[in-house]
Image (spheres, rainbow, N blue to C red):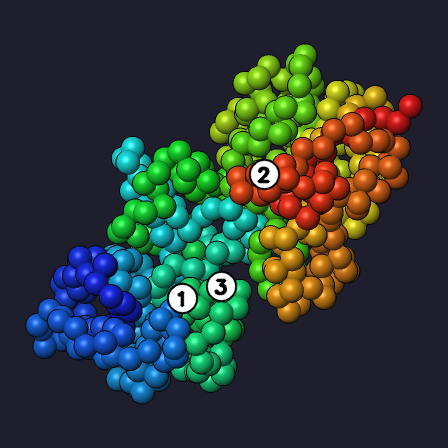
Amino acid sequence: MKMLVAISNYGTANDRYRDRLLKEYLAMSFGTDIVLMAEKVKDIPAHPNISLITGLPSRDPWSLPFLHRPLFIERQDDYDLFVYSEDDTLLTEANVNAFLEAERLLPEGMIPGFLRYEEGPDGQRYCSTMHAFYHWDVGSVAEYGGKLFGYYTNEHGALYILTRGQLKKAIASGGYTVTPHAGMYDMLVSAATDPYTMCGLKKMICLSDIQNFMLHHLPNIYSINAGRSIQNILSYNDLKKQIRAMEKLWSEGRVSERLFPLPQNLPTREFNRVFHTKVKGGITALAGTPPKRILSIGCVDGKDERHLMDMGHSVRAVPADGIIAALASGKGVRLTSPNLDSALKELDGESFDLILLDNVLQYFQKPSELLLRLRESAGNDASAILVARNLKSVTMYRKRKVGAARRLLGDFSRSGICFTDLSVIRSWIKQSGMRIDSIVPVMGRKKRILNRLTLGMLMSFFADEFIVKAVPSK
C-alpha cells in the first residue's frame, strides 16, 4: 500500500503541529511519501520521504491548499491512497485502516469521511465540526455491510482521503481540476471539500465505529474559551447520544422523521435552522411570570427549553427531528414525535399558555395557517413567541446577494424557505388572529450602540433577528 500525503503549511505558526503530523505519517506501515506545500522556500525536517513544493496558485494566500491538485493529478497512477491535509489535523494509522474498511462497504459514489474533535480545558472532547446550523441529514442514515452510516451537513474536516479509483473519478468529473475558488465554503475550506461538493462523491460518517472517524484538531482553539465556544459546539458525549438515537430509530424504521424539510438549492446553509444554540434571553424575558405551560415547536438541542424549565415554566416540545431530540431529551425536556400530526395527537387534551416557535414558521409554506392550527390545538387563549431571522438586515443583505440565494429566497417551491422580515412576521400574526404585543430585536454590540442613535423604524435594517410576542386579538 503506497500513500501520497500533501500538507498545506503556510507560514510558521503551525510548524509544531506540522511536525507532529510528519512523525505520525512516517511511523505508519504504509509506503508513505509526504509533500509539504508552502508559500515560499522554508526549512523542513530532513527525511528522504519528505519534499517541499512552493508557490501560490493565485494572489490569495488562502489558495495555497489548491497546490495539491496538480500534484495528485500528475501522480494519480503512482499511489493507492491520496491524502490532503491542513497542517494541524492529525490522522492516525487506525483512521486510515478504518477508512479502508468502510470504503469497501459503501456503495459507489459514497466515501468515508471524518469529523474533527478538540480537547477542552475541562478535559472533555468537543466535536468542532458540529456547531451552528450543521446537522445530521435524517434521510441519509442507512446500513451498509452491517455498519450504520450517516451524512453530516458540514463536509469540512480539513482533510480527505481518496483511493486511486476515487481520485480518477473526481478528476473525470471536472470538479477537481478547477482553479482556487470559494463557494459553499470559503477558499481554504473548499480545497478540502471539493471532492464532496463538486465531484459527485458523498461524504458518509461511519456511526458504528465513530471513534476511528474522529480526527484531533491539535490547536484546540474552538474549545479553549468555555464561556463563548463550548456551549455552541457539540460534546463527544452528546455525539454518542445522537448515535444511540440513530441506531434506535433505524431499528424502528423511524430515523427519517422530521418536523419540516430544510431549505434546498441555496448556496449557503446559513439559512437553515440553527441546531446548536445559545440561550436567548429575549425568549425568557417575553415568557415572563408567572410560570406558564409552554409548547415549543421545532425544539433542537433543548437549551432554551431547559432554561425556561429552570425559570419555573412547564415545557412540552415537538423536536425538529428524532436525532437532535436526543440532546433535548438528555436535558430533561419532555418530547413528542417530530411528526406534527402525530405530535398533536399525543398532545390532545393538553392546553398551553404559550407557544414557542424559534425559527420554525419560515420553513412551512403557509406559516399563518400553521400558527392558527397550533393555537386551536394549544387553546385559543394562548400567546405565542415567534423568532425569525431578519433577511432584510444589513448583515443578511450581502448573503442574499450570493447568486442563487437572492433569486430563491422567498420562492418556497424552489427553496423550501419563506422570506422573513418584520413586516412579514406582522402579516403572519395578523392572519392567524393575533396581534403583536412586544418586539425584541437581536443584534451585535456595535449594532445595539448604533441603534440607539437611529430612529426605531430603522431597527429593521440593523436587527439580525426578531423575537416577537403575539397575543390573541380582542
Q: If the image is split into quadrants, where does the C terminus sit? A: top right
Q: Is residue 253 above or below residue 85?
A: above
Is the residue under label 1 in contact with that under label 2 (CB below 8 Å)?
Answer: no
- Neighbour tally class for label 3: few under 14, some 14-19, many 20 plus, Cα within 10 Å: many
Q: Nearer the viewer, residue 369 or 109?
A: 369
| Residue shown at 36% from the left, 52% from the top | 116
271 sits to left or right of 421: left
Q: Quadrant of residue 91?
A: bottom left
| Residue shown at 59% from the left, 22% from the top | 308
User: Alpha carbon of mark 3 to alpha carbon of mark 2: how far?
Assistant: 29 Å
User: Alpha carbon of mark 3 to alpha carbon of mark 1: how far?
Assistant: 8 Å
Q: Which residue is mark 2?
A: 448
Q: Which residue is mark 3?
A: 185
Q: Is residue 83 above or below residue 364?
A: below
Per the image, label 1 sits on a secondary structure element best described as helix
**If you read the primary sequence from the N terminus, does the residue marked by circle 3 or circle 2 appear first?**
3
Find the residue positioned furthest to the top.
290
The numbered mark at residue 188 is: 1
Question: What's under tag 1, amino acid-wise?
Answer: Leu
